[in-house]
Amino acid sequence: MTSSSAASRKALSKIACNRLQKELVEWQVNPPAGFKHKVTDNLQRWVIEVNGASGTLYANETYQLQVDFPEHYPMEAPQVIFIPPAPLHPHIYSNGHICLDILYDSWSPAMTASSICISILSMLSSSTVKQRPADNDRYVKNCRNGRSPKETRWWFHDDKV
Amino acid sequence: MVELIGFCHRCDKVVHCSIEPIDLQNYTVLTEADIRQHQEEDIMRISTVLSISKVSASILLRYYSWSVSKVHDEWFADEEKVRRAVGLPEKPVVDYPNAQEHNCGICFETYPRDKMHAAACGHPFCSSCWAGYISTAINDGPGCLMLRCPDPSCGAVVCQDMINALASAEDKEKYSRYFIRSYVEDNRKTKWCPAPGCDYAIDFIVGGGSYDVTCRCSYSFCWNCTEEAHRPVDCGTVAKWILKNSAESENMNWILANSKPCPKCKRPIEKNQGCMHITCTPPCKFEFCWLCLGAWSDHGERTGGFYACNRYETAKQEGVYDETEKRREMAKNSLERYTHYYERWATNQSSRQKALADLQQMQTVHLEKLSDIQCQPESQLKFITEAWLQIVECRRVLKWTYAYGYYLPEHEHAKRQFFEYLQGEAESGLERLHQCAEKELQVYLNEEDPSKDFNEFRTKLAGLTSVTRNYFENLVRALENGLSDVDSHGACSRTASSKNLGGTSNKGRGGRGKATTSRSSSSSRNIDDLGHWSCEHCTFANVKSATVCQMCGQMCQQRR
């Protein structure tokens, strides 16, 4: 499931619009714990505030997630990145890209923005060390000119964090 | 077929025993229809034996790389485990017995129950979401063959019956292509023929025999590495050789050996003739001395003129240039060696292409003409096609002997010498055949009436073909054995040559193969029980009365 950053800027299809409106309503009725959707009139780009769970390395810290929905959402995965400064985490690059399988290969249209948020928070909470991925500098250098993380061929090797 | 006669160990009666040739074809060429049929048969077999639907059987086979026996083993060892791993639940994991309506887990709309579909797991989604999900997966590639239920926590597979019910005609066609491709590509015993534009696949029985296969499209390739057929050279050497032929390193070697960088702009310059006064091309235009690379303005009569350089000579004596010069010299030597083998490899390759074209021409034009002139049915002219096929095959073998020679260690002198001798003999044998099939045949093509000696020509060409075939078959075997005779016999390499490469037609009739006399005194050992004598040069079996070899015109050793 590939889509360039240019393609993701295409207007949402009717199916995608309907589904996102339903997701938004559901979010307002039943928001996932620890997240706040920053209200804008842009249905295609959500900015979500993340609060680190208490009792974890990220307690009392706040980060911002940017979720861009492609034209054929939910058949295609949304693009999800942290707006820098991104949390220090072995799977999060300093440019905000996140190495998490459900955002790429393992995306399923039955997932939602809310379920993604919960997965990301769980990824943060299970971290035991605050550090960048080993290949951070090389990766970030290769991603200049605003390349989308969806163009990266991710290799998911660590199922513990 | 070879017939052996012997005595039974128990009753001492004479027994006859027929043995199929060892290199019995160990592969089958499959058309698309054959592939579909094999696939269908395997699916039917699993479906029957396991009492499951055909779509489930095909998923199981696909999961276990189309190995029927693997499916059997795994299934009967632990059916539950297999069902879990593959994603074939026996009954739905979710059940809504009373619900009239369902919420689609993708678009979140509500639909009546009969408008929803689910895989074996029972997770319901609406038709249009299923269609979108399936279409996205199919357009993403062959991964769609193991498509899972969209529910993130569910591993149930989406079977082909759902694809057929919900996908567009175009997507179904794509899916079906991936399905048949998977049968060839994921199966350990089948591969596509690598010839461009060829749609056949090869079903190969692994174990024993050679890897060489010839597709119905007439392309011959090695089943193991899928490069073109390359006996007597092994797959590893071929890979090395091909890499070498394409390697940038060879270009670098050449530049290093044959050029020097302009001392000013550093672009490489090749000097192929002329004096030592070099002027770099514009825009640089720097003038310098080729030998010492100093500015030409410092040169002139006093430094030795245009064809020498005193400064260079002095500096060389002082050892200033040694390092780079030595490296350049070495690169040049190794490059020359490589070029020697590469040129001959490539020449045989193009000769082979030419021979293929000639064969084509022969089959489409000349044979018919010849049949008219000589009043012979075309079926009687098969020996000409066979000769050309043999030429094509020999060119291929000869080509690869040059890669073989390139990698034969420099220090194994005896082996190298022996190898070069064999290669030379092979070359001249092939030339003889080629000459006969090309030039001598021409005479009969230009005649107006049937020629009296056409039958003699037939005997000669057929004989040469068979002699050359034998020689090359033995050559291939000897090289594949790593010329092992050389190690054991050392200086007796020539003996080994006549032992290995003598006509195989004599095999099994006597102990002649073990002859140890040296080649120069060979004579009586070449006479067999029927009084034939085998020519020392081309190995042709001549009749007793002939004093000169009928094939190559050499005098019989014994009668000199």
Image (cartoon, rainbow, N blue to C red):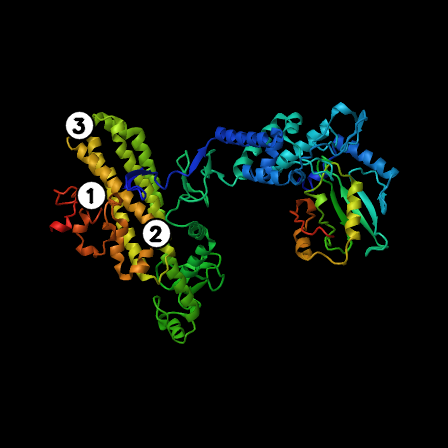
Instruction: Locate residue B362 relative to residue A144 in the image: left or right.
Output: left
Residue A5 seen in render: yes
- Tag 3 and tag 1, C-beta contact below 8 Å: no
Q: Earlier in the sequence, mark 1 or mark 2?
A: 2
Instruction: Locate residue A76 relative to residue B453 in the image: left or right.
Output: right
Numbered disc 2: secondary structure: helix
Characterize the local packing of mark 3: few (<14), some (14-19) or many (20 or more) Cα atoms within 10 angstroms.
some
Amino acid beneath label 2: Leu
Residue B347, label in figure: none
Q: Position of residue A107 (x, y in %)?
A: 71, 40
Residue B541, label in figure: 1
Which residue is pictured at 35% across the width and 61% down the height?
Answer: B410
Numbered disc 1: secondary structure: strand
Picture quadrant of residue B357: top left
Per the image, the residue denoted by label 2 is: B479
Characterize the local packing of mark 2: few (<14), some (14-19) or many (20 or more) Cα atoms within 10 angstroms.
some
Residue B450, label in figure: 3
Q: Residue under mark 1: which chain is it in?
A: B
Choose between B86 and B173: the one closer to the eye: B86
Instruction: Locate residue B48 relative to residue B347 in the image: left or right.
Output: right
Choose between A9 and B146: the one closer to the eye: B146
Gap between marks 1 and 2 measured at Cα: 24 Å
Q: Earlier in the sequence, mark 3 or mark 2?
A: 3
